[in-house]
Image (cartoon, rainbow, N blue to C red):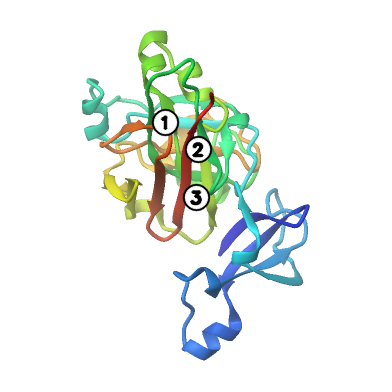
Amino acid sequence: MRIARFAAGDEVRYGVVDADPDQAAANGQPDVSAPGGLTMAEISGHPFGPGTDVRLTGARYPVADVRLLAPVLPSKIVAIGRNYADHARETGSEPPAEPLFFLKPSTAVIGPGDAIVRPDRLSQRIDFEGELAIVFGRLCREVPAERAPEVIFGYTCANDVTARDLQISDGQWTRAKGFDTFCPLGPWIETDLDPADVLLTTTVNGEVKQRERTSKLIHDIATLVSYVTAVMTILPGDVLLTGTPAGIGPLIAGDTVSVSVEGIGTLTNRVVDSS
């Protein structure tokens, strides 16, 4: 099931993204690659939290007629660094023996189609980092690895945008990772994904920059969930970024960057300067 957050007019709602039933009937199968072939079935309330059921209201909108928003507004984003060996080495580091994690502020979140704002007065280099993101569905703490699937609501695409020069000069990552617009998420949450071995691809202006399978993660998803929840309480809707593969590189104003995850979809954002 694909759960999206969207705006129809002035109202923000959640919905289930699926194929237009009339088109599916005419074609014999849904065409999920065509925007005109997708519809949004509105749900009542929000889908997060214990005992929350997805209840349809009966309202339905063509996806082409609504604005997709970030699929979740987390209280926090926990991000994992250097979780692909080739990426660790391209940054001049060895793969970490234990997960290396940091926080991004909730104010960094933007949705599909929103602009990544390059803080050109403060940074001369911002980089893309395409990632698979976990969306938690319930409050949890100290989750054993074998029970990790019980607390995961689904998965989405993410871009851990980073001011690389500030990351190097500061010696820590908070400022470099924390600018507004530095955490695009979307286009929706896929609840039925097996994340063990899916293809992640990042393109800039249509050119492939990153291409790797999640089977190459150093620390797998169950391990990450257990490790992070041993430290902090996770709230429904919180997000965990699982790490970026090799191939990171700079973005400049005018670029269009897309992160695609097999089985989910594609998150696309443009880049603009702040000044």
Closer to us: 144 or 27: 27
Residue 260 located left or right of residue 121 = left
Asked whether disc 2 touches disc 3, contact meaning CB atoms under 8 Å apart, the reply is no
**Badge 1 is on which residue?**
80
Which comes before the other along the chain, label 2 or label 3? 3
In the displayed structure, does residue 107 sit left or right of residue 192? right
Disc ID at residue 61? none
Residue with the mark numbered 3: 156
Name which residue type carries label 3.
Thr
Res 162 visible: yes
Disc 3: CA contacts within 10 A as few (<14), some (14-19) or many (>=20):
many
Spot occupied by residue 169 in the image (x, y as percentages of width and height): 38, 9
Q: Is the N terminus in the top left, top right, bottom left or bottom right quadrant?
A: bottom right
Q: Nearer the viewer, residue 218 or 93?
A: 93
Instruction: Report if the CB atoms under discs 2 and 1 are less than 8 Å apart.
Output: yes
Q: State how many labels appear.
A: 3
Q: Is residue 222 above or below residue 68?
A: above
Q: Is residue 117 above or below residue 71?
A: above
Percent of width and height locating residue 139: 65, 40
